[in-house]
Amino acid sequence: RHVACVMDGNGRWAQRRSLPRTAGHQAAETTVIDIIEAARASGVEWLSLYAFSTENWNRPDPEVEFLMRLVRRVVRKHAPSLLARGIRCRFLGVADPRVPRGLARDFDDLTTLTEENRGMTLTVAFDHGGRRDIVQAARSLILSGTPADDVTERLFAEHLPFPDTPDVDLVIRTSGEQRISNFMLWQVAYAEWVFPEALWPDFRAADFLACLHTYRCRDRRFGGVPPRTNGDRS
């Protein structure tokens, strides 16, 4: 139902071709559009993409500035297509004042433009940090005057951004790196993870479908044990 992607490997993709890191970010656009369409066509109801983390502000200023311009161009370019395909768009994060006002406004405009769509929900995590979301939810609970003994997991989740978002079923992190990187920490608690070796700019619909197949072959027990089969003494 819910697939999340950590889009990793843009810089290494460029480095292997003796290109600037920005070339890797540019090449990533094709993959983003390819995966959005593959997810929609496969019946995925929720797709979340990790585009820019709270830690990414530590990158060199020219790279950050390039990313801001690139993302704004991509949002404006593909907004009509996202609307036509019935995709509802959301942006998770966007809290830092360093996010350019024009980009934040474009995010708001695309959210408003597509809010009535009832196809797949696309969540772009931009200026996102899972720990920050949890801290803000705790602050919200405290400010609401909720007694400590009344706090439950369900109530806590209602104070997270976009509380209607279902838990993530599958996380795909490209480039072979195996880290969570502060991504949707609450929502990925019981997710299955797949780590394809392909760098994000080389990742395509066929690779995405292979990850879905891997997921379907997993036995999700959520801490329990599988039902005992006839004659099984284990």
Image (cartoon, grey):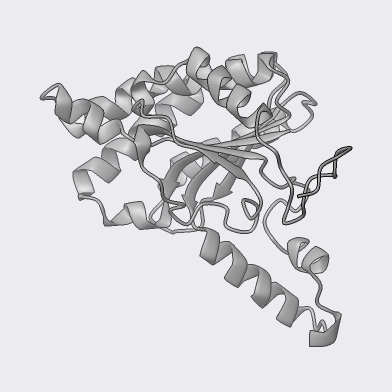
- For this rendering, which residue is in front, 185 or 226? 226
Please indicate whether residue 105 sits to the left or right of residue 152 in the image.
left
* Spot occupied by residue 93 in the image (x, y as percentages of width and height): 54, 52
Q: Which residue corresponds to the image point at 32% horizontal and 21% vertical from the top-left?
A: 27
- For this rendering, which residue is in front, 2 or 178? 178
Seen from this angle, which residue lies furthest right?
A: 230
* Spot occupied by residue 166 in the image (x, y as percentages of width and height): 75, 45
- Residue 93 in view of the camera: yes
* Spot occupied by residue 102 in the image (x, y as percentages of width and height): 45, 40
Please indicate whether residue 177 sits to the left or right of residue 5 in the image.
left
Residue 215 figure quarter: top right
Please indicate whether residue 229 sits to the left or right of residue 35 in the image.
right
Total numbered circles? 0
Quadrant holding the N terminus: top right
Q: Which residue corresponds to the image point at 79% horizontal and 86% vertical from the top-left?
A: 148
* 210 vs 127: above or below: above
* Spot occupied by residue 23 in the image (x, y as percentages of width and height): 23, 25
Seen from this angle, which residue lies furthest left?
A: 18
* 183 vs 216: above or below: below
Residue 216 figure quarter: top right
- Residue 80 in view of the camera: no
Q: Which residue corresponds to the image point at 72% horizontal and 26% vertical from the top-left?
A: 120
